[in-house]
Amino acid sequence: MRNAESPEPKALKPVELEALSQPLSASNDPDELHEECGVLGLWSPEPLPVADLLQLGLFALQHRGQEAAGICVSNGKDLVIEKDLGLVTQVFDEARMQRLRIPAANLGIGHTRYSTTGSNLRFNAQPLNVRSSKGILAIAHNGNFVNALQIRQALLEHGAVFQTTNDTEVMINLIARYAKLDLVEATARAMRELTGGFSVVLMDRHTVLALRDGNGVRPLVIGRLSNGGWVFASEPPALALMGAEFVRDVRPGELVWVDEAGGLSSWQVLEPCPTPCAFEWIYFARADATLDGIATHPARIRMGEVLAREAPVEADLVVPVPDSGIGAAIGYSRASGLPFDFGLHKNPYAGRTFIQPTQEMRDLKVRLKLAATPVVAGKRVVLVDDSIVRGTTSGRIVQLLREAGATEVHVRISSPPIKFPCYYGIDTAARKELVASTHTLEQIRALIGADSLAFLSEAGVREAIGGPVCLACFNGQYPAGQPEEEVRKEALETEGASAL
Amino acid sequence: MRNAESPEPKALKPVELEALSQPLSASNDPDELHEECGVLGLWSPEPLPVADLLQLGLFALQHRGQEAAGICVSNGKDLVIEKDLGLVTQVFDEARMQRLRIPAANLGIGHTRYSTTGSNLRFNAQPLNVRSSKGILAIAHNGNFVNALQIRQALLEHGAVFQTTNDTEVMINLIARYAKLDLVEATARAMRELTGGFSVVLMDRHTVLALRDGNGVRPLVIGRLSNGGWVFASEPPALALMGAEFVRDVRPGELVWVDEAGGLSSWQVLEPCPTPCAFEWIYFARADATLDGIATHPARIRMGEVLAREAPVEADLVVPVPDSGIGAAIGYSRASGLPFDFGLHKNPYAGRTFIQPTQEMRDLKVRLKLAATPVVAGKRVVLVDDSIVRGTTSGRIVQLLREAGATEVHVRISSPPIKFPCYYGIDTAARKELVASTHTLEQIRALIGADSLAFLSEAGVREAIGGPVCLACFNGQYPAGQPEEEVRKEALETEGASAL
Amino acid sequence: MRNAESPEPKALKPVELEALSQPLSASNDPDELHEECGVLGLWSPEPLPVADLLQLGLFALQHRGQEAAGICVSNGKDLVIEKDLGLVTQVFDEARMQRLRIPAANLGIGHTRYSTTGSNLRFNAQPLNVRSSKGILAIAHNGNFVNALQIRQALLEHGAVFQTTNDTEVMINLIARYAKLDLVEATARAMRELTGGFSVVLMDRHTVLALRDGNGVRPLVIGRLSNGGWVFASEPPALALMGAEFVRDVRPGELVWVDEAGGLSSWQVLEPCPTPCAFEWIYFARADATLDGIATHPARIRMGEVLAREAPVEADLVVPVPDSGIGAAIGYSRASGLPFDFGLHKNPYAGRTFIQPTQEMRDLKVRLKLAATPVVAGKRVVLVDDSIVRGTTSGRIVQLLREAGATEVHVRISSPPIKFPCYYGIDTAARKELVASTHTLEQIRALIGADSLAFLSEAGVREAIGGPVCLACFNGQYPAGQPEEEVRKEALETEGASAL
Amino acid sequence: MRNAESPEPKALKPVELEALSQPLSASNDPDELHEECGVLGLWSPEPLPVADLLQLGLFALQHRGQEAAGICVSNGKDLVIEKDLGLVTQVFDEARMQRLRIPAANLGIGHTRYSTTGSNLRFNAQPLNVRSSKGILAIAHNGNFVNALQIRQALLEHGAVFQTTNDTEVMINLIARYAKLDLVEATARAMRELTGGFSVVLMDRHTVLALRDGNGVRPLVIGRLSNGGWVFASEPPALALMGAEFVRDVRPGELVWVDEAGGLSSWQVLEPCPTPCAFEWIYFARADATLDGIATHPARIRMGEVLAREAPVEADLVVPVPDSGIGAAIGYSRASGLPFDFGLHKNPYAGRTFIQPTQEMRDLKVRLKLAATPVVAGKRVVLVDDSIVRGTTSGRIVQLLREAGATEVHVRISSPPIKFPCYYGIDTAARKELVASTHTLEQIRALIGADSLAFLSEAGVREAIGGPVCLACFNGQYPAGQPEEEVRKEALETEGASAL
């Protein structure tokens, strides 16, 4: 039997059909913070599959940089480097791994990179390697030098040439310039000349160096292989995957060196003044990492707990923005007694989105990644996330929850408002693009359409983490200095002049 | 000052270094269940960017098949198809999208495919399209016909040729064989001839058909565009992303047809006997989907709640296996009052793993994907997952938790033991590979090294879902029939003989 | 010392700058004739690297089709096929070769394809393989069936489905339809049903068949391996590269079969009426080939000699259009006594051009491929080529020679004017696009800007080749029949309706 | 009727079946000479599609380097560079061209590279660009500096770092080191410091420089666009394809500069002492090129004529090795009165061969490229080629001709025996690998299996070319100096130590 059916079509608008054909770079979401790099080093007293181990370690550090990856290995004689734009598993295909598997390799370094907008160029991938007065060197770097431009200018005037706009090339040129010093001395001298936040791993064909700026802004840890070899990594989970045991963090201002015999020497080159980046605990570092003695996921739970205490609200459900708000949402749920649930479904394939975005299409971008689940229908929801950069994404998410029937949406952010740029390796937006830099709390709340909005206090962050931290992006107090504005501005214009 | 340092290296074994260079196919994990397909259809009264909308819809159905994807569009005159192995975002690069964006397109169908082991061949990708006595047809199919081989044999004897081993090609040949019937009649007749579990979307250059087997084993829903057009999809989230409003499920045994004027006609071809697949609620369908009136994530929470009631345990923490165990873990936590936390960190890049696995390497595979977080240290953990197939992965995860300091690990599974193969579109292992088919509960517990192990009962599943379901993989009662064993065995041997 | 220099710029126009960014498909030059295919077959009494040998043979047949290539191999049990768009060396990369190198392979077939405009689709690549009542079959085909559409229509009405628009699929369906006959009988019966010009190689998992239409329009030869195995190939140079010795041509209307024991049986299925395609000697077949007892390069020299006798001219230099006019130019030079020289340089990388072509850009296309050398300056040139299709290229070349200083350009063509389409496997233009079909000799001369123009006569072709040949494209007399116009026209419209 | 057929198989050996699976790099044939580079520059007074024009020019220079290609363009503000391994048409795909098509571009340079064995690395591709005290510079280079290693060593000691082993990086560092001089002065100073054979094109964001060493070893010509712009290119055919008119050659030792206003200035930096490389006329330069006033193809014909006079032989046929021996074979035929014919067929797809070569496989490599045609059967053949490097290929070709029935094979080479390495940019083998360096004429003849063998004399080369030329590879007299042996040897060891 045939039943003709014609329900009345309602005025649902197909999602911005006209703009669907624009390409979308998934990884440059301007509404997220980006760590700039992960670094690795390995030295073994006997031949090992160094390239394969570094590949595993980089895979564990993939979250610290998705634009490019590189590995450099040596057997004391040959030194081979492979790097390119792409994820670790894309860059290190079988052909590249074969080229890296040189006989009797026993040392190497690795790098994952998040490049800043407009400079996602292959030639900026690291490790960077050069031939210098000290032989062949390779370097991998996480962070930024705040006086890189001045030093670069001085080097140019002495006849140096640069092939990239990387800070890293400045450091390696500086080391090479101290032609009369040995590698360790020259590196220590360069540490003293450069200011900012940086963790660096450096190798020649026989030895590996690792160092951290005096404030220890960026993390770096030491691990040990069962055969007596050494591993350096931005975060401990890389050690675990490489089969190394955690030994300790590299200390702020410390330079460590694995010599040709495998001895680990240490120099306290700079006065230590520890202020590691708070955002490592708020968002960047892996949930299974422990940095400078403090585990990240429990710290995030504590942030949620303090936040619940600082900014309670009457509601039915605590919902995290997956995955960044999960830890704090659990903490908020525990401290508030409100039930925790996944009110937002994250499409696990969304990292590879592909379509879009004119300004109007930001909506689609969020919808490709997130969808509200039926559990929010009829509920007063506490929506928990780690931070707000521009605010547009938060607004879209509030809207998704309302469409799915949430009756109230209270946004709780487990960090203070970001008002200042980071000069130590995080790709925050320019200051004028930071919504908290130009809007009041109430204005932001209105902008994102929330029923209420609260941020964790600076004191709350300190309490939850429990150690000294850099909070410069929240309060503008830069413990490791900031660039001379004049130089910076001029430099940016010069950069802009070249898409090199 | 220089401090020589040489901590005593401990006997930590680097993770199976010797085997690191083996390739790993991320998507054929034999210890997971795989849905075989997602299907889509669209008909609009006016030109739309059909290919772009189908691409969005397929992106929302990516979890139903990651091996291949395809889109077919028509404007009533031209009909273009693009399909290949790969994820939706890989297959539909800019070049392919350009070829699909034909002028004035107003209808199309789409498909995502998970192919069974050994047959991940490009020519098996769908939609399948053919020229027949009824003109050009294209078909997209989710499920399996249990009598496909008998029908295929009969067609061969009448001179038909087949280019694939797809069930789908059998259906389309059957439809073509009814050369004197019109398309709707021929399709209805084919529905009557074929038994099994299947949802199908079919198009010619003007109209779209959608149908579901009499048991409604596989899901299929109807949506409406604001312009009066119609959309068919395996799950409602695809409708949402395409801008369509959910209308209703296609009924078991129903055939619906959007004719050239946009009218939707319906025929109840087969007697409805609804037993939709329970695994859609246990695991497959998206957490934000509602199928046959029942939302999946809340059902998963209920499964956890019933499980806590059926198999309580004294413990400190409820930990999900991410992401499959999350819903049930929340339910278990709520019903038991034990705190919920993420004791396992999932590497978000693990979908693209790359290295691996001889049998010994299974461990690395799990470690690339999961790592235990410090919150489990010193805790008695309830580990919640949705199912156990072979049991090896569960064992690895228990081990990870113990290494991270969990004092007890109690495994709770939110479905009954899988003992029987699925003949309706899920790629379960052969029966002898199903651990629950060959081991007792206690043997499985010992195998995975858990302190205790419990599965949800069949009654518990029924209670949590709350509607009639197919539980054949748990109890061997096949509501839609099963293949004649002799034919099946013979057929498998023939298949084995050709890597075609 | 510094000398400022500023020669007066002349009014040389940069080569059509505005249009440089258009893509150019190098292989679909509408001003050249295209052979549609090369075929191969191999059977060995013992395991051989069959895939590698077929790859070599296809490489030797690359000139017969550059759009797609495919290889199918079997070891009597498994049957594997790999095919794709691209040159032999592109299609058969290491990954594909590995998949083709099955253990103990002892038979296989291969194919290179030139697809007609608009249908360069992957699914049209050959070998085509199907599962049929006779088991798995694979087929490779060169030529066309003139009654394919009628037979296809009849098959459709009996319920067959087609996945391509290939003639080949018609033949394989026809063979499958004779379900009660064995493979050899069914193939012989299909040969009798089909008319046109075709050479076919066909295999199942144990045996290989080869056949040629009754007129022997397309070539096919038999070779023998030193181990007693058999090889079939479109041209003898493929035998040589595969290490096989030439035995003889397959005879017009003959079907040969290598059975499972390696015996070669022969059936004269059709009355032989040999009229092989004259263009094999004029242009298509390799210069080192001998077909039906007549070597091609010497035949081309004889064409030039006869042409010099038929159309002498007072001049200084005989210049070939490289490479197609070389043989005839040598002959013209010898018979006329005028010196031979390369007045045109062919860029050896031009097969891979990339830029272009609005109609205006035809000029750039020729310039990317050819440049006049200084030897023509001040000379009266006889320009020799094998044929004229549309005439545009010839005109461009005449212009190049004049720009380089040639005082006169006399064009001599070593074949008669092409006035009729080929229905036997050559992709000639539609009749209205053939310049000789719509213009007088004098009009063509004026069009291409030559000082004089002459074509070889039909009698001249016959004399130079020295055997019976098909001259249908010159005189419209089709020895193997031509399609019923009504059916054809209708069919073309149907095809046009689908870009499948 | 069925006729069983079983000809007696003969002992033809399938072509080295066992080795077919080895990869073959088509472009590193050790038995050919390789030019190392082609260079281009362009400056226009108004915006032009600079990238497209440079792509055309590079296409015309593809024969000078097939390993890598690069283009750099600027609009006075932005400067963009794209380069990679591959042919011009491979490197400059649509995506790369889009990135190069910056608005209002009016200048640029280009490069094609043949890299020496083992260093076909992406980072060695040119143009090389750097940021220096003089702003951003880009450089493209053809040739070699014989004192590069000494200068490099001195720069290293002053703190410079190098990222490649390219000579080119030495030159650009040297220019940057003269930080107080302007770009033209610094470049002139670098010209004076560096010795060897080199043609260089250099740009900053506003101007273009071109220069040639004092001996003019490598070619470089000046052309003019109709709009008043300037073009520099290694060979005139690149000018033609870019729509520029030939003006003159850059003079040996000359530096020319197109300033921001479009004025062309010239400095005679080095004393001109012209000895251009003879091999440009013998083999490298295109047949349609005229360098330093002498056309190449006619010079090749004259070489054949002189050779026929110096080394006559009684024979029936003059056969060139295609394509390198064609010009000389025509000349030999004319002077000797023996008929010219193509006794060897060259597979036009052979540039992309793929299979290969242990030493035993050299034979297959030649057979993939060349096949003897039937015209040589029963003939006494004069086989003409341009040069012999190792002699293996010549031996294979002689064998091919004999297999095809040639009764005698007399080899005639249109250049003297190569006995010395080139230090000015040609990739000759090491001296011990040059057959003429270690064997007598009679030994070479025996090695290649010829009935007789003769080389053109040095006097013959001079007579045929008609101007002063560098003959260092024949007589060891290096007009532009040669590297200090000690430094060279040490350097090579260092290079070997790194696969960088």
Image: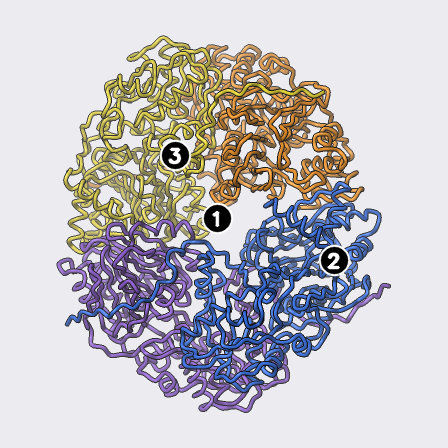
Chain colours: A blue, B purple, C yellow, D orange
What is the distance, in whole Å, between disc 1 and disc 3 at their CAs? 34 Å
Name the mark nearer the viewer: 1 or 2: 2
Q: Secondary structure at mark 2?
A: strand
Instruction: Identify the residue position indicated by label 3 in the image.
Output: C357
The number of numbered badges drawn on the structure is 3
Q: Is residue C195 left or right of residue A283?
A: left
Q: Secondary structure at mark 1?
A: helix
Disc 1 residue crowd, few under 14, some 14–19, many 20+, Cα 10 Å: some
Q: Is D379 in front, or is B227?
A: B227
The image shows residue B211 at horizontal and vertical percentages of 25, 68
Q: Which mark is residue D491?
A: none
Disc 3 residue crowd, few under 14, some 14–19, many 20+, Cα 10 Å: some
Q: Secondary structure at mark 3?
A: loop
Q: Amino acid at mark 2?
A: Val
Instruction: Identify the residue position indicated by label 1 in the image.
Output: C94
Name the mark nearer the viewer: 3 or 2: 3
Q: Is residue B227 visible?
A: yes
Name the mark nearer the viewer: 1 or 3: 3
Residue shown at the point (64%, 36%) measured from the top left? D204
For residue B113, above or below residue D379: below
The image shows residue B415 at horizontal and vertical percentages of 42, 82
Q: Is D295 in front, or is C69?
A: D295
Q: Amino acid at mark 1?
A: Glu
Q: Is residue B230 left or right of residue D142?
A: left
- On whether disc 1 and disc 2 are found on a single subunit, the reply is no
Output the chain of dot 3: C
Q: Which mark is residue A208?
A: 2
Q: Is D100 in front, or is C471?
A: D100
Write down the quadrant of residue B61 in the picture. bottom left
For residue D390, above or below residue D337: below
What is the distance, in whole Å, between disc 1 and disc 2 at their CAs? 37 Å
